[in-house]
Image (spheres, helix red, strand yellow):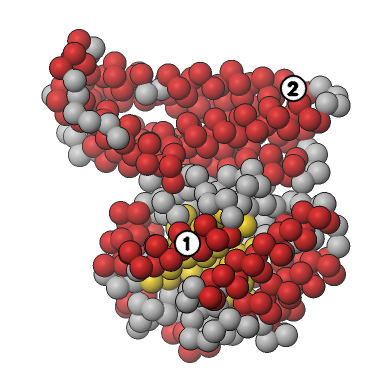
Amino acid sequence: MVGPPHPMVHQMPPTDKLHTLHDRLRSGVALVSKLEDLLRERGNPEAKLAAFARVSDYLQDVVLPHLRAERAVLYPEAAPLVGIDQQLVRRLEDSCEELERCVARVLHDQARLRGGVHDSAGCRRHIATLVRLLRRHLQAVEDELLPCLDRELSDRDVYRIYERIQEVSFDEELAGRVPAGAEAAVAAARRLRDGQGIDSELFFLGEYVSDPELVERTVATTIEACRLLGSAGLAAHLSIDPTAIGLLSDADACRRNAERIARSVAEQPLGRLNLVMLDMEDLTLVEPTLRLHRELLALGLPAGITLQARLRRTADDIGPLLGQPTAVRLVKGAFPLGPEHDHQGGRAVSAAYLALATRMLAPEAREAGLRPIFATHDGTLILRIAALARSQGWASDQFEFEMLLGVRMDLQRRLRSEGFSVRAHLPFGSAGVTPTLPGGEHPAEAVHLGEA
């Protein structure tokens, strides 16, 4: 952890220290650009996967932690200052959100490539957008915001911001490291519940899998985690991607695998929120996932479903779910296609999220037995939803907020202290996929909870 500044540090002008925080980000931009060039070439899939893995490490270990630290420290410090244009702060925050969405798309492309889905043109487009936006963001911070901080703050305050960004970035990097196996994941879930009263939802990393052996491994490992949770006295609350259990190759096999997992969940001790939650992936998979949810419910199995506020169709998809005893998890979503299918821009997505949350918190939904789950790191949205739930007569244990393990722990603890139910999305395994909120949403939001 970063300690007090050494006296020699003051040989460097304060904002120059903030500039140095961008050096690691710049050093990896060339690596990402080389991947774009490599994807233009024919053949050599092993080299492409290896290059994608290096880029993935850079994005997860360097870019995302820094962006989250900027959002958690730099902009809250800058916003109250009289001499700083608030539009500039909002623009930089929006830029962080867009960058996190770009990172999520690139990491999603990696998952698809590992699963055998090849879309080189789409990958190159996402990578080129990421590189362009990252360079533009770094330039804007350095040329527009840092000179203002130099003018408005003392050297001591600038150094304090520098150190705090380093601390948060380091914590976020550690939070991105996930347990390797089911036993370690259950142990982490137990520590979280016993130490902070926060529940967990386990998710074995992987998506867009077509190899039957990998599919069976996912199913077997998820069932093992389910049984370990039950034995540990924890709720058997699990999240699965349909494409990780066979949907890409065999819809019937996917249904059978989902039923196996759901029956294992149903066999665990009663009195806890035992549930298998279906993640929502890209638009082509919405209908199959909704159908899978209906099939599990028809069998009397404890199944929930994830919906994406970004998609315009969600306003229609959610209607039939509000009148039945199931769990609906609402995310912002990270599979943008265009204005025909999506709400455009962070503010429009947030507005759609709040409108859907309002419907989920209607008294009629509560009477039908719906359990609303709001998966977002957007602190503003969370506070509005909490107030709305109270005004509609929902008890604090009748709905819950969900966030990625290790992200916005300050907000998670605050919500728990106020009596709200909080669940951590706890990925585990070594599938080489970055932890994201369900629905492909990366915790970039407002630190993801400005975008989550």
The answer to which of 338 and 281 lies nearer the viewer is: 281
Marks 1 and 2, how far apart in space? Answer: 41 Å
Residue 435, percent from left and from top? 55, 49
Tell me the kind of residue under disc 2: Leu
Residue farthest toward the top in the current orientation of the protein = 11
Q: Using a 10 Å C-alpha cutoff, classify the residue at mark 2 as few (fewer than 14 neighbours), some (14 to 19) or many (20 or more).
A: some
Tell me the kind of residue under disc 1: Ala
Q: Residue at x 36, y 68 (%)?
A: 194
Q: Mark 1 points at which residue?
A: 187
Task: Report whether 332 appears left or right of 281.
Answer: left
Q: Mark 2 points at which residue?
A: 38
Q: From the viewer's perspective, is residue 272 above or below residue 333?
A: below
The N terminus: image quadrant = top left
Task: Report whether 325 appears left or right of 43.
Answer: left
Residue 242, percent from left and from top? 72, 62
Q: From the viewer's perspective, is residue 149 above or below residue 247?
A: above
Among the 4 quarters of the image, the one containing residue 221? bottom right
Q: Residue at x 35, y 81 (%)?
A: 395
Q: Which residue is drawn at 58% across and 81% down?
A: 268
Q: Can residue 93 be seen in this view?
A: no
Q: Can residue 137 be seen in this view?
A: yes
